[in-house]
Image: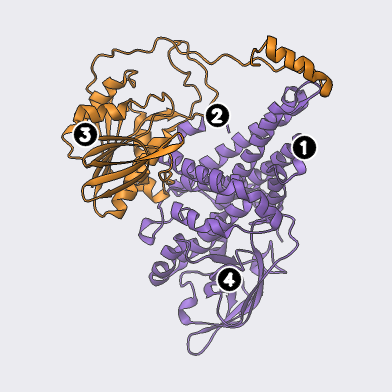
Amino acid sequence: MKIAVCIKRVPDMETRFKIAASGTAVDEAGLKYDMSDFDGYAVETALQLNEKQGPGETVVISLGPDVVQEQLRKALSMGADRAVQLKAERVPTDGLVIARALAAELKGGAYDLIFFGRQAVDSANATVGPMVAELLGLPCATAVSTLDIANGRGTARRDLEGAAEIVEFALPAVVTIDEGMPRARYPSLKGIMAAKKKPLEVKPAQLGEERLTLEKMELPPERAAGRIVGEGPGAVAELVRLLHTEAKVL
Amino acid sequence: MQDFFDIDSVLSEEERAVRDSVRQFVDERILPIIGDCYVEGRFPKEIIPGLAELGVFGANLPEEYGCAGLNNVAYGLIMQELERGDSGIRSFASVQGALVMYPIFAFGSEEQKKHYLPKMAAGEIIGCFGLTEPDFGSNPSGMSSMANEQPDGSWILNGAKMWITNGSQAKVAIVWAKTNGEKSDKSIRGFIVPTNTPGFTAKDQKGKLSLRASDTSELVFQEVRLPKDAILPKSGGIKSPLMCLTQARYGISWGVIGAAMACYEEALAYSTTRVMFGKAIGGFQLQQQRLAVMLTEIVKAQLVSLHLGRLKDAGTFTPQQVSFAKRNNCDIATDVAREARRLLGANGILAEYASMRHMANLESVYTYEGTHDIHTLILGQAVTGLSAFN
């Protein structure tokens, strides 16, 4: 099968972020980057499908400045066959602009499956995958945690709050990948060496005008320190009074 | 740890990718279990397939033998990351790659290379290296193990080896022995000895207070009969095993940096969260002195090993330069580990923290593959031209 996986470069989410002077981005000094976790699951899912189902091609695509080549090469070192960078000075805020650029690249590619992570772990919009499906007129299964492909059809499970859905769809299709799918493999050292020789094509991203822009970014307010109202059974009356009059939860 | 001197900027993208992949493996697969392994005195065999899949065994040997074909800086970074987990894990990989696969690669016949190297890279065959003997540690030239050639071309091997990492789990041993009754170290040759050969026994060395997550064994050879093709044809004289040690010592110079990094990171994190006298202890001058010295020594050691790696890749490094790096880096790593343990106060003696485990491990690493003192004498001889050995 021919599978495209769209991946995003994101900062390590364990970082204690600072806001940059511009006020519309995080301060990049000292940040470490990786591919978004869910995108890693998506690459792994594609590789395993092609390993299981015989000869196929896994193509990884990322939109952004040249630094995204690092994540593309990581996917190549995991085993993807080739990579495409849709070159842009920055990743647009407006998901539809990204989706149009990706759709333009994916359109003539004759892909059986197009994978995304469920959402990027940094911006958490979860919009680009479904938008690409819409633009290409393809069925879209979002946040899937299992996936079976047979006879040109896919069956996927979607884990919801307190229930699960099983959906079925015809290929070609867009699928966004959730936890539950296999975790990304460690790029092997041979894979890292082999990735140097695999094709990584750089094309300008076809970017339209953004109708959604980022105005301001701010850190969540610091939580105020807790207060100890007393100790032992003697403090219960005071605690109840404060929960009633101050916190107003009783 | 924070890359204070921006050393990443002089590493290639592949070198960083190799380091990051091994780092992730160590974080996820080794750090969660290693404290318990150490306390139990158990080498975690279960990680061998994962390490093989990653490709760490003999990673700087060529791809045609199933290896990754990395340069020596990338290889060093692998050693650093493994020892950030534990010196025992790094020792396992060092022995497999630098002391077993390397001599087969350097001194073996084409048949031996094709037979052993791919299986060893895949972790299917584990090896050990027998040079040190009970009475010959720093002076391996004096060894008494002897292999005598028989009229039919086969060999009979007798002798004993001690302090052999991986000894009891190895399928093959590279054994160094004098040959045909000659006492001179010029007669030393290397042999590939399958450990199931009659007359070969390996016994675990008990009671170790260091490298507890690593197998260390004593090997005994009693009338071990080896086929004609067991000999490493291109080995000759004490120089051959010393060439292997140069490879391993290079890796050690990187490895101990990893152990020191783990201790520094642990101490730094503890210093910013442990509150005493109403503030984080990292705010006290005595602890800042500790942290500043640790950081400085780690960065200096990194620069030494990195430069040595570039020289090795250029093919111009000398064994004396390797002695310099092994001696310095083991020395600073033992100091960093001890200071980290002290900064951690009483908590520092627990297996839950890594510093004391590293501190105890590093005493072995300081001692093996040429003791600190022997490397001092190698440097002394290099600069004065005068030998202090005899």
Query: Do the residues at discs 1 and 3 belong to one chain?
Result: no
Residue toward you, B128 or B178: B128
Q: Judging from the image, what secondary structure is the residue with disc 4 in?
A: strand
Look at the numbered disc 1 and give the secondary structure of its residue. helix
Chain for colour orange? A
The chain carrying label 3 is A
Chain painted in purple in the figure: B
Chain that bears disc 4: B
Disc tally is 4
Residue at the image point whose x is 54% and y is 66% from the top: B127
Of the numbered discs 1 and 4, the one sitting upstream in the chain is 4
Alpha carbons under labels 3 and 2: distance apart: 50 Å
Residues packed near mark 2 inside 10 Å, few (<14), some (14 to 19) or many (20 plus): few
Nearer-N-terminus badge (4/2): 2
Comparing marks 4 and 2, which lies closer to the viewer?
2
Q: Secondary structure at mark 3?
A: loop
Q: Are marks 1 and 2 on the same chain?
A: yes
Can residue B386 be seen from the camera position used here? no
Amino acid type assigned to the residue bearing label 2 in the image: Phe
x, y percent for residue B105: 44, 63
Where residue B209 sits in the image (x, y, percent)? 75, 56
Quarter holding residue B282: top right
> Residue B200 at what x, y percent from top left?
61, 78
Please give left or right for residue A43 compared with residue B107 in the image: left
Find residue A138 and name its label.
3
Whether callout 4 and callout 3 share a subunit is answered no
Q: Which residue is mark 2?
A: B5
Q: Chain of mark 1?
A: B
Left of B333 or right of it: where is A182?
left
